[in-house]
Amino acid sequence: MAPRVNSELLLVGSLPADSADSALRSAAGFFGDLVFALPDGETGPRSAWVGYERERLVRPNPGVVVVQETESPTGIPRHAYETPVFGLRPGVSGLHWDSWPRIDDAITGYRVFSALRTEGVIPAHLRFQVGLPFPSSALNGFKSDFAADYPVAERAFEDLAARELTRLTAAIPPADLAIQWDLAYETQDLEGVLAWTGEGAWERFAGPVTRLTRLIPEEVLVGYHLCYGTFPEWPMYEARDMGLLVRMANFAVANSGRTVDWLHLAGPRYLRSEDRSFFRPLADLEPGGARVFLGIVLPIDGAAGLRRRHATASRYLSDFGVAMYCGFGRQPGADGTETMREHARVVRTVRDAERS
């Protein structure tokens, strides 16, 4: 079967805009001919990524207690160790969530997307892209007694995700939908750099791959975003090479129980643009029919930097698209429109150079 995704650019998720309408209008104008799907920008509270799950999903649950409040003097966490710490309320052996607020926002975003597509603002062939955090990322606040509390929370979250995937795909026509699983804490868990986790990191990643992705209807496009996070800066942890991301991607393709349509693998910081050892594991990538997008667009060095990283990666992987290293809704700078314009310019400049 021919690949269902073959675009040159992936928009990872968050965009520098103040509303879904603004994000979608801008993204359609700047990137409409480069992408296969448009996200609604993950604006407002979702701009904090899984800070949204901490505050809108986990904190309000009556079975959860706040063991330690955020340590930030402003009340807004500035990095992973200032976030609130959660635990299970004494005597609680199970959790339940009725609904996932992120799904409500996705359905609302699709209504905006659909209206703009009807107006001709969004090209007719583009899908609506929804990013959903994997369990370890969504539940990263369970740091107090991780070994005891996390398995309970994960079971409840997977039950929630299964029910809400059904609601999402009932509200949005599967042929219009692209779902991206977002993984950042899973990656760092596997690297062994999260102080609050312990043994079992591979199962915390692999288990949801085998259980959750197969629940998504085949008509929906599905991808994985494998990243090292941007909290407080890119990356939260800089890997030695892309070996772990390749291993995770290969497992996801082989064990998702359905087609994986795209893979996003975050790249290095700009100083390692020509570090062949960093990119060499790409030679072992087995993407099947998935389109590979390398997160090698960095805002600090423009088209020249992207060309360097593209040339280095091309030694080990012959065909791939590009993307920002992560979502860029929190990029520095006050002018989000200019940020998106520059992103499009850089990608087109390198594309045209490759073709000439």
Image (spheres, rainbow, N blue to C red):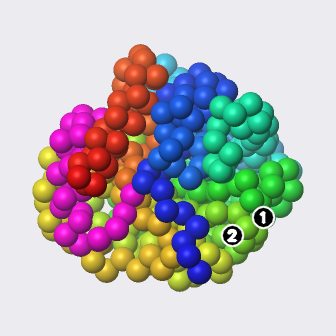
Closest to the observer, 54 or 166: 166
Query: In the rendered structure, which disc, 2 or 1, sits on the residue that comes first in sequence?
Result: 1
Where does the image place residue 8, in percent across and percent down from the top left?
A: 42, 54
Where does the image place residue 193, in percent across and percent down from the top left?
A: 35, 58
Closest to the observer, 226 or 111: 111
Give, as a three-letter code, the residue at label 2.
Leu
Q: Single out the residue that lies furthest toward the top.
A: 334
> Hey, which quadrant is residue 24 in on the image?
top right
Closest to the observer, 73 or 331: 331
Crowding near the residue tagged with mark 1, few <14, some 14–19, many ≥20 C-alpha atoms within 10 Å? some
Count of labels shown?
A: 2
Q: Quadrant of the N terminus?
A: bottom right
Answer yes or no: is residue 79 visible: no
Identify the residue at image location x=13%, y=60%: 275
Q: Secondary structure at mark 1?
A: helix
Q: Is residue 49 magenta?
A: no
In this rendering, would 91 be left or right of 199?
right
Q: Which residues are magenta?
A: 299-321
Q: Distance from label 2 to label 1 (Cα)?
A: 7 Å
Give, as a three-letter code, the residue at label 1.
Ala
Mark carried by residue 356: none
Q: Single out the residue that lies furthest toward the front.
A: 356
Q: Which residue is mark 2?
A: 212
> Mark 1 and mark 2 in contact (Cβ < 8 Å)?
yes
Where does the image place residue 132, in percent across and percent down from the top left?
A: 63, 52
Q: Which residue is mark 1?
A: 162
